[in-house]
Amino acid sequence: MFDINREHPEYTAWKRVWPRYRDLYLGGEQFTANADRYLIPRQKEPPEVYQERVSRAFYENYIGSIIDWYAATLFRREPLVTLEGRDEGARQFFNGLAEDCDRQGSTLSDFFRKQVIEALVMGRSYIVLDFPRLGVQAGSKAEEDALGLSRGYFSQYPAQSAIHWQKDESGEYEWVVLRGERLVSGGEAVGHIERQWVRYDRERFTIFRQDDRDGSQAAIVQVDEGRHGLAGLGKVPVFEFTLGDGMWLMNKASSLQLEHFNKSNALAWALTMGLFSMPVIYSEKEFKQTMGESYYVQLGKDDRFGWTEPEGHVFEIALQNTDRLKEEIYRICYMMSQAGGALSKNSALTGLSKQRDYLVTQEVLRGFGDKVKDTLKKLLRTLAAARQDEIEIGVSGLDEFDIGEFSSELEDAQRLLSLGIPSKTLETQIQKKLAMKYLCDASQQVKDRIAQEIDAQATA
């Protein structure tokens, strides 16, 4: 009997780390609510002092801003999906898919922006290519289209959803188990937790479910099974999206971010305590005077009065250290051009040096874009094959991140065309590229119609 709740060793190794990475990315109240997990207590620190430090904890979320910047900049312009072929039904379907790819109103750009963020934070994300299940059997492709059974869509699953899997020699999945849970309110005052497992292999899917009420777990029962949409292709409909271990930014920066959190909070605590300095009286006489806000202190001729407060050398060192940690977070994320601050060495760099640093950032962005395009092409082409569409699909873009004046690009294109290169294909592709850039916010249907008209004019 297959144990549906069994976990893969790789999943077991990472499942304790992922909640920390999620907290580091989100920051805000979620992080400070769990500050006792990350704020290191001092040796023999009294519990009440540590709890006060925890209640005062704050978090400067550099890595979260870095990841959001990468995701926003990468999709500043949408990826360009090109459709070649005379299958009008397929064109209409894929144009509609570009505007709503998950049946929740997400465009392809919005959907993959979430996948990039998930991959940068958790190392990977999972996309399921699914089809509607209406409980009816279609007799032909036309009937499938009429019933809506061929309207495939994407579903996203976070990294912790895939609990077990097996791959073949070529790295393709033989089967995958996805686990998730949700709070079901119903008519109950508190509600109960419903867990669901979905097992996909190359031909079939099986769904299991379990209810958890007041900590009492019911038995795991099978609730559905059948053939999935990629059974005809012999493929598991689960696709892993990852940017690679070297580009898993949260994994690279998490230890530095936690060190910065502890150092900055220790510095803030020391400064706060320094505001409540204790008075010191230098006198050879025994001190017996009453102290208080409404009292005064009488000193002798040779007596002196002072305060116990630090000289500040360690504060300066701590401030330099926290600034260095911040710079290191930006450096290992390939964003030195954006590491600033009054003490930052980067603030003294010339404009040329910062431009060179940004060139490195752009190369990283292009690498991210290549990963997105490869995965998107694989998904769209697999979907077209499952639907038996006679259409060729291409994906381009995600390689320009400095949004300059369109007039400069137009001038470059005019100079290229003025060379008189005898290629109608070159002229057609230049026209398409200019049109798509100028109308980057237009719908996929409009872009596809323009591309068709340019192609028709070229062949006329």
Image (spheres, rainbow, N blue to C red):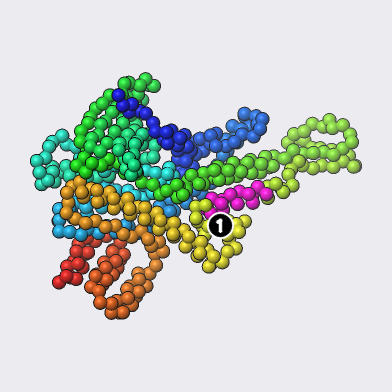
Decide if residue 205 is on the left or right side of residue 279: left
Q: Quadrant of the N terminus?
A: top left
Q: Nearer the viewer, residue 445 or 331?
A: 331
Q: Nearer the viewer, residue 460 or 310?
A: 460
Give the overall secondary structure of the magenta segment: helix
From the top left corner, tell me how far across and down residue 87 is, in percent: 15, 56
Number of marks drawn: 1
Find disc 1 in the rendering and name its residue. Answer: 340
From the top left corner, tell me how far across and down residue 84 is, in percent: 20, 59
SS of the residue at dot 1? Answer: loop
From the top left corner, tell me how far across and down residue 216 is, in percent: 37, 20
From the top left corner, tell me how far across and down residue 37 is, in percent: 53, 34
User: Which residue shows up at 48% across the image and 44% down it?
Assistant: 251
Rendered view: 222 above or below 395: above
Query: Mark 1: which amino acid?
Result: Gly
User: Which residue shows up at 56% across the image and 51% down it?
Assistant: 328
User: Which residue shows up at 49% across the image and 55% down it?
Assistant: 334
Few, some or many C-alpha atoms within 10 Å of disc 1 (few <14, some 14-19, many ≥20)? some
Query: Is residue 327 located in the magenta-colored stretch of the structure?
Result: yes
In this picture, which residue range is highlighted in magenta?
317-331
Query: Is residue 323 located in the magenta-colored stretch of the structure?
Result: yes
Decide if residue 286 is on the left or right side of residue 10: right
